[in-house]
Amino acid sequence: MNNKCSQQNNKCSQQYKFDVPEIIFGRGSLSQVGSCAKRLGGKKVFLVSDEGLLNAGWVDYVMRSLTEAGLSFVFYGQVTSNPKDYEIEDGFKEYVRHRADVIVGVGGGSAMDAAKGIAILGSNGGRIQDFCGNNMINRPLPPLVLCPTTCGTGSDVSQFVIVNDSAEKCKFTIMSRCVAPDISLTDPDTLKTLPEEYLGSSAIDALSHAVEAYFSVASSTLTDVNALEALRLLEKSLRPAVKEHRRDDMENLCRASLHAGMAFSNALLGVGHALAHPIGGLYDANHGHVNAILLPEVLRFNFPVAGNKLAVLARTLGYENFGAKKFSEEIAFEAVGKLIEAGGGPTGLKALGVCKEDFAVLAERALRDVCLLTSPRQTDSDDLQDILSKVY
Amino acid sequence: MNNKCSQQNNKCSQQYKFDVPEIIFGRGSLSQVGSCAKRLGGKKVFLVSDEGLLNAGWVDYVMRSLTEAGLSFVFYGQVTSNPKDYEIEDGFKEYVRHRADVIVGVGGGSAMDAAKGIAILGSNGGRIQDFCGNNMINRPLPPLVLCPTTCGTGSDVSQFVIVNDSAEKCKFTIMSRCVAPDISLTDPDTLKTLPEEYLGSSAIDALSHAVEAYFSVASSTLTDVNALEALRLLEKSLRPAVKEHRRDDMENLCRASLHAGMAFSNALLGVGHALAHPIGGLYDANHGHVNAILLPEVLRFNFPVAGNKLAVLARTLGYENFGAKKFSEEIAFEAVGKLIEAGGGPTGLKALGVCKEDFAVLAERALRDVCLLTSPRQTDSDDLQDILSKVY
């Protein structure tokens, strides 16, 4: 990343990459999982999901689709939130034992990241920690279909995997174009059974992806159109979706998640996610809640380098007709804050069990996170601890 | 396609697909063609381009990149505008004779469509006419890298190939997800050597892609964000690019082409392109010029089913603050017309050598074109001949 570019607000010429999987989107599309796995050449599917999805009936629904496509399958459901290294390693052993040849992940970010982790080990072997960092994967993954059932993670389109190192209690990031799946399949009907607490928090995760990707130094029109569409959809549908659960609004949250995922997978993220990962790892905290708490102060931290993008952000979030720079900052801050409020959730890190004594170690871990590579503003441990203090 | 959906202005639930190649974009990126071909597993490259690009030095530039990546190559430059079936078949014979294993197309729509056609025959054999229509390709294509050097075709990201049947003097359309390349690589610097006459006309081709994709019954937020971004960029940069050739404006035209390509490859097109193909085939006419002539009347034809998208179109093209439906229609028509005027080119079909006596056969051929599948308004031969008469 060229930091001079970021200082000049992206005025100099850059080369951009944009890579997204094949995307299928629509109510009822989960019934196509079988045909998707089949056309990727699969015969035996390794189906990764979690207990919640099993109880809600979606795992059965997917199994029927696999059976109808003439595929056999093995179910692996031992995935918890903030997926742990040992869950991925156990899954990998099952994958090998059953000689499966295609992987389907159905669930939130945890189930999908676990599916990605199992796929990494499936073709590369080793320990999942071996692949931490940027471009550490040498062999292409087995065919992979990912089906999100929340509305925020973006893992179904992204080049990221987030895993919790259980010994270190620290999330680490794997970034590689190899880990984007072959097919991302979103069926908005799955939101009907999403527990209330996850609806708002996952939508706020999408919000934080869209905002951080929009201000990233690696953003381009290719990612900006998607980041802004995510913001527009969240502004339109987050409040009514949380309050009234109307089907069109729920569907819009799924669209927002998809657009935000396409944006951040290619523009990457920034300080917010660099901090959210160690916090999530150390306290096993809800990722959407951590982002909701951090995002306003991360946005403020970026004010000095945000340029006229702040005004576009505010306008996209429904605030028209303003001009002065100072005013843009206030309005953007207010608009993002109101959306976060609509998403619900705790309002300070203290409520998540974060201890002030851990600030230094959290900042130190954030400085090693790949998300910092694309932060629009250079940062250090003091800056990061200052942000943590402000949102405590 | 569900026509009821189109009548109801897309209010009912649909399933959408969105599939685009890996995209690389930026000045100087053409020097990466070698490394792209290499990571697709290529050893011997079949390089398809045309005389104009050879004379402008870009073919040499690409050859250097291939050599630097340690790849050998064969050059095939026998491609003319509106690429002919026999040019593709000759190219295929050379491809087989030299045992090449990856195909690189560098040029406008003609060179890239020829490269796609050679790739289709490369893995499927037969005659190129055998693949006419929707989803007629059974075997995946050899690795394919496409590098546009004009700013309109979108062939570098699209699931379309347009070939001229030389005996019938009729363009036919091949549509398949297989024909989208592995990598789309745009280097805006190549526009520096594009002859004046092609700059405006290829930008208007992008305009027609964006407009037709936006009103297609298969459009979704996934395609709309790209169609609208293309329109925004064309509104901003078409006039100054044609007048002053500023580098940033030229780059924006390339971006517009890319966004419009992502939109129409997935939302498909409509009446305009269904008519443009037989006209281009029968008179070997410049595709951008044909589109420029047809587009305003095609837009008018769609007024009854365009709904509030007309107002969004007009706003995106720089017209603010209006409300009434009638007014939206006038404004959208005017805005598109002004952009077309800025692109230059002839103003009626007569100037392209079209004969009125051919209207019936042109309409009959258009009715068989796959582009009609996604027209927002049902049409018949009388409608099509009426449009042709109005723009004669």
Image (cartoon, coloured by chain):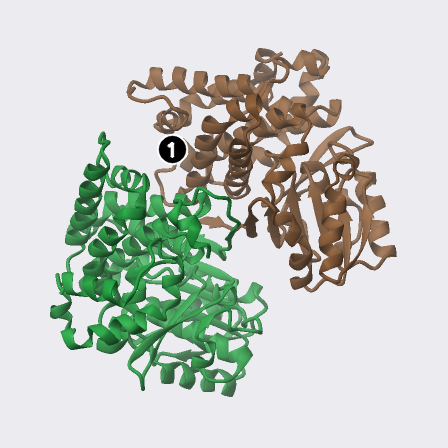
Chain colours: A green, B brown
Q: Quadrant of the C terminus of chain B?
A: top right
Residue A40 horizontal/vertical position (percent)? 57, 65
- Judge from the rendering whether residue B47 lies leftward or rightward of residue A188; answer left or right: right
Above or below residue B311? Residue B213 is: below
Q: Position of residue A106 (x, y in %)?
A: 38, 68
Whether residue B2 is visible, yes or no, is yes
**Residue in the foreground of this view, choosing between A312 and A382:** A382
Residue A190, compared with residue A110, is above or below; it is above
Amino acid, disc 1:
Asn
Location of residue A139 with respect to B109 vertically, above or below: below
As drawn, the residue found furthest toward the right would be: B97
Please provide percent x and percent y for residue A162: 37, 71
| Residue A194 visible | no
- Residue linked to disc 1: B9
Q: How many marks?
A: 1
- Identity of the residue drawn at 46% across and 26% down: B235
Displayed quadrant of residue A383: bottom left
Dot 1: few (<14), some (14–19), or many (≥20) neighbours within 10 Å?
A: some
What is the chain identity of the residue bearing mark 1? B
Task: Name the spot of residue A293 as percent of width and height, x first.
Answer: 18, 60
